[in-house]
Image (tube, rainbow, N blue to C red):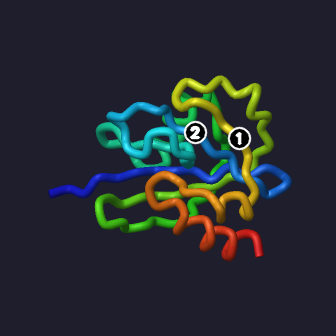
């Protein structure tokens, strides 16, 4: 049986803050009302990179340009590919089509938050490897 795949992207502004999406507060979705990385799941035979590019266009009308692969995680219930990019955005100008809102957070903020899925495990490693 083929494992489920998830794809996410860490978008860092010039202050090294991370853009997160507040998930819709709908009981039928996982982690309703939680902060989450932008991302999604591949459709058809999409590669993880094709998926994240499509998801960002669908969710935020955002063309990513060059992105970097960070790591593949193997979680108990799915595999996840994490990408990242330095990108200064103005959250209030993002045309958000999924989720309640977007906002930037510092690493210190994120350490105190309960994020969707397994992202509380991703950020310490990302910050240690990419920002130190």
Q: Quadrant of the C terminus?
A: bottom right
Asked whether, in this view, residue 120 is left or right of residue 66, the answer is: left
Q: Quadrant of the N terminus?
A: bottom left
117 relative to 33, above or below: below
Residue 80 percent coordinates (x, y)? 42, 58
Residue at the farthest left position: 1
In the image, residue 105 above or below residue 60: below
Characterize the local packing of mark 2: few (<14), some (14-19) or many (20 or more) Cα atoms within 10 angstroms.
Answer: many
Give me the disc on residue 103: 1
Q: Earlier in the sequence, mark 1 or mark 2?
A: 2
- Measure the alpha-carbon separation of dots 1 and 2: 8 Å
Among the 4 quarters of the image, the one containing residue 74: bottom left
Q: Decide which of 82, 53 is in the foreground and name it.
A: 82
| Residue that numbered label 2 is attached to | 22
Q: Residue at x 35, y 53 (%)?
A: 5
Q: Is residue 8 left or right of residue 16?
A: left
Q: Secondary structure at mark 2?
A: strand
Residue 50 x %, y %: 47, 42
Disc 1 is placed on an element classified as strand
**Image position of 50 (left or right of 42):** right
Image coordinates for residue 6, horizontal then vertical, percent: 40, 51
């Amino acid at each position: 049986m083929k494992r489920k795949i998830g794809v996410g992207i860490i978008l860092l502004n010039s202050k090294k803050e991370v853009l997160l999406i507040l998930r819709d507060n709908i009981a039928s979705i996982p982690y309703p009302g939680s902060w989450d990385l932008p991302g999604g799941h591949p459709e058809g035979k999409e590669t993880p990179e094709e998926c994240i590019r499509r998801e960002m266009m669908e969710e935020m009308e955002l063309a990513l340009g060059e992105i970097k692969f960070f790591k593949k995680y193997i979680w108990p219930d799915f595999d996840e590919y994490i990408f990242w990019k330095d990108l200064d955005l103005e959250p209030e100008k993002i045309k958000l089509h999924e989720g309640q809102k977007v906002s930037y957070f510092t690493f210190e903020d994120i350490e105190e938050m309960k994020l969707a899925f397994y992202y509380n495990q991703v950020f310490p490693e990302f910050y240690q490897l990419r920002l130190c």
